[in-house]
Image (tube, grey):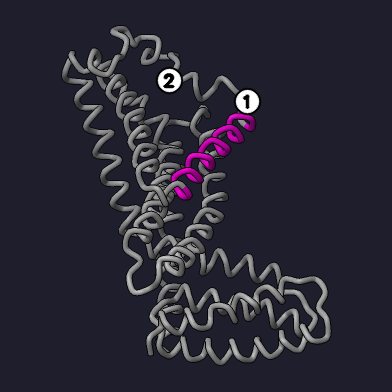
Amino acid sequence: MDVDAYSARNRHTWARLDYLTGRRKLTGAESDELVLLYRRTSQQLARLQTHSPEPELVAGLSAVLARSRGKIVGSSPDTGSEILRFFTHRFPAAVYRVFGWWLGVAVVFLSVAAGFATWISVDASARRTLGLQEDSTALTAPGGTFETYYTEHSNDAFAALVWTNNAWVSALALFLGILIVPVLYLLFMNALNIGVTAGLMAEAGRLDSLFGFLLPHGMLELTAIFIAGGAGLKLGWTLVDPGRMSRTEALAQQGRATAAIALGLVPTLLVAGLLEGFVTPSTLPTPVRIACGLLAETLFLGYIFLAGRRASREADSATSG
């Protein structure tokens, strides 16, 4: 079975079914057509589950059929169940499937940041090359702008500000990925900023303060940005190399996965924002603050790799069974 040709031949049927399902009112003829298309698409999904190795295609059709079934029987989908399934299956599976991409982003990002930090801390000419001020005491001194940045606003306002900013950066990384270059630039500039700050703090002998203020929230925050960047680049690469599918179908499929990641990262970044707003500037001992960040990071990665791997295997079993 040529899955690409089969999908292209029946795509209009699936689109029509989705369109009728989304309409508030149907004529008698349209209602009959909806039932007919539902039965036909159910049979086509069964064939795809036998022959298609594309879990996203199967998942997309399954979602359309679920909505259509609710329309036919006159009931709405269980919103609570849909939300639960999103966070137990769709989101972790989507992140898990692009693990190689965001791991690569993480390695390059941290390497660039570490490279700039080392250069600035050991080479006096680095400041001139990068256009930095010769005197950075205002930034690096105890009680300087690096530290007061986390305390100049109220905790709740700062958490909201950080959440909004990080969500915006992640959204740009995700949806500008189709162009690839803007995402690479965005990631590079963020790595440069972190590297410059780390280099200046290292030169001043204040690495303890740097890690004490960055790690409580930065581990989860950067992981979310790495995921957004990796998923965005994966979306862009799909345009370059769509694999066995047509570019339109491949982009649609990867676009759905990217949208799922974007939605799932919203609460993730909310947690990072709460850590940055309430834990990072708190009077808790530094080891305790870092432990809070490490716990959040461990729980998130465990969730992605355990729930994501399980959901991916279930989808793979559905397509081969």
Kind of residue at disc 1: Ser
Looking at the image, residue 229 lies above or below residue 256: above
Residue at the image position 49 percent from the left and 79 percent from the top: 58
Q: Nearer the viewer, residue 202 or 98?
A: 98
Number of residues whose C-alpha sits closer than 10 Å to that of mark 2, classed few (under 14), some (14–19) or many (20 or more): some
Query: Secondary structure beneath disc 2?
Result: helix
Answer with the quarter of the image where residue 197 lies: top left
How far across and down, in percent of the image, does residue 223 sit? Answer: 40, 47
Answer with the quarter of the image where residue 115 lies: top left
Direction from residue 154 to residue 268 in the image, left or right: left
How far across and down, in percent of the image, does residue 35 sit? Answer: 71, 88
Q: Nearer the viewer, residue 171 or 133?
A: 171
Q: Nearer the viewer, residue 54 or 263?
A: 54
Residue at the image position 37 percent from the left and 61 percent from the top: 238
**What mark, if any, has residue 146 been given in the picture?**
2
Answer with the quarter of the image where residue 309 lies: bottom left
Q: Which residues are magenta?
A: 156-175
Direction from residue 81 to residue 260 in the image, left or right: left
**What mark, if any, has residue 21 been given in the picture?**
none
Residue under numbered circle 1: 154
Looking at the image, residue 254 lies above or below residue 184: below
> Of label 2 and label 1, which has the lower sequence position?
2
Kind of residue at disc 2: Phe
Distance Cα–Cα, label 2 vs label 1 = 16 Å
Query: Secondary structure beneath disc 1?
Result: loop
Direction from residue 75 to residue 173 in the image, left or right: left
Q: Is residue 172 magenta?
A: yes
